[in-house]
Image (cartoon, rainbow, N blue to C red):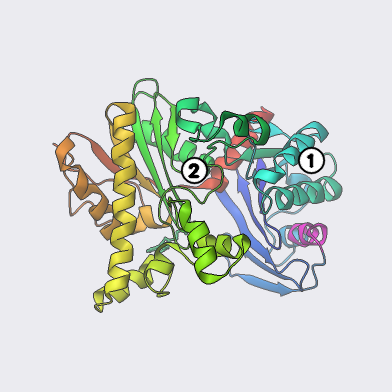
Amino acid sequence: MKVLVINCGSSSLKYQLIDSETEKALAVGLCERIGIDGRLNHTPAGGEKVVIEKDMPDHKVAVSMVLDALVNEEYGVIKDLREIDAVGHRLVHGGEKFSSSVIIDENVIAAVEECNPLAPLHNPANLIGVRACQAIMPGVPNIGVFDTAFHQTMEPVAYMYGLPYEYYEKYKVRRYGFHGTSHSFVSKRAYEMLKLDPSDSRLIVCHLGNGSSISAIKNGKVTDTSMGLTPLEGLVMGTRCGDLDPTIIEYLAHAMNKSLEEIMVILNKESGVYGLSGGVSSDFRDLDAASNEGNEKAKLAVEVFSYRAAKYIGSYIAAMNGVDAIVFTAGLGENNIVVRRQILEHFGYIGITLDEEANNVRGKEAVISTPDSKVVAAVIPTNEELAIAHETVALLK
Ligand code: ADP
């Protein structure tokens, strides 16, 4: 099957056309500046990137430009749009309504809309993408794959905040978790690669990228994950602060005479390792370079990141009463040797030993612990688009 995977934001639309048999992307691309002016970046597999500047007043126009690019004589990858069997959409927040992927119909759209207040920036944009595909590709099934779904196995003990219970009932305030598609994909691959029994294993998956989250997966089910009601909770991230004493929000609002909204922008966009490093960068490649040149704040930012990650891993080892494997994925988890070392150094007490040579790996599968390590540590690249294509095919079979 050929599955068009779409990740739609408010002014952008990322896509991949994936052949589910070969598991390869036939083309990848990005529509940018939708509603502003419009630019399509399209790259056919093995070919050169094509940039098309053309007005994109809305997402419908963007989707039709993507389809035109896919069948273009010069840089297209299919002859006829009828070759596209289904569209898989990334949907960010499914609340408590969705614990797995779904074939999208009007009822599903209404249920996702009910979750909009929980993800006001993402869900409405995701649905605009769905509507655009429905309009332009009638008869082609649309499948929704939720960032939150995989984490729905969490028990109340892990997802409840220490707040009045009625806020959960009235306002759905609880921990949901994100990056579920990636945590699910990587855990499944870990069971195969590390020969673990999914029904009898304790796994910790560290999705470390610009946004980062860690999850504890016991016997194939998520028991805890570091992101909460929104993706702001948990680890220190590229520009997000992660866990914080909530009083800081009130304190800073007073100290700087700023509104709540302004403080939230700071916590989401100006904090994390970017803020900690004094604005050097949110990208760890820049932070590593600055640290090597003696920038103390950049060095501290990386250390704070690793320390927080190690604390989460430690708490999940306690939550699962042990751990069989710790797996690293996403941009940083797959590529940053220093961060993996800094994190794993905390776990000598449970007998983890890092194989320095094996840890010298970027972007590919590898076991990075020594053969006699009591717990396996590994790198497994994530592929959220392929995971969405898998889910789409599985639902349609
Ligand atoms: P996002 O959450 O935006 O998808 P990524 O998963 O791409 O983010 O992760 C971004 C981080 O991963 C950056 O800090 C960057 O330093 C690091 N990273 C990504 N690719 C590489 C690479 N090829 N080599 C080294 N670091 C990388």
Image spot of residue 386 (x, y percent)? 55, 44
Residue labelled with disc 2: 182
Residue 14 appears in the figure: yes
Which mark, residue 263?
none
Instruction: Determine whether, in the image, residue 102 is placed left or right of residue 297.
Output: right
Q: Around disc 2, counting alpha carbons within 10 Å, would you say few (fewer than 14), some (14 to 19), or many (20 or more)?
A: many
Q: Around disc 1, counting alpha carbons within 10 Å, would you say few (fewer than 14), some (14 to 19), or many (20 or more)?
A: some
> Mark 2 belongs to which amino acid?
Ser
Image spot of residue 360 (x, y percent)? 24, 57
Give whichever of 151, 330 is nearer the camera.
Answer: 151
Q: Secondary structure at mark 1?
A: loop
Image spot of residue 375 (x, y percent)? 22, 35
Residue 240 appears in the figure: no
Image spot of residue 288 (x, y percent)? 31, 69
At x 75% / y 63%, what residue is drawn? 72
Residue labelled with disc 1: 140
Quarter of the picture for ligand 1? bottom left
At x 28% / y 76%, what residue is drawn? 295
> Mark 1 belongs to which amino acid?
Val
Magenta highlight on residue 62: yes
Sequence-first tag of 2 and 1: 1
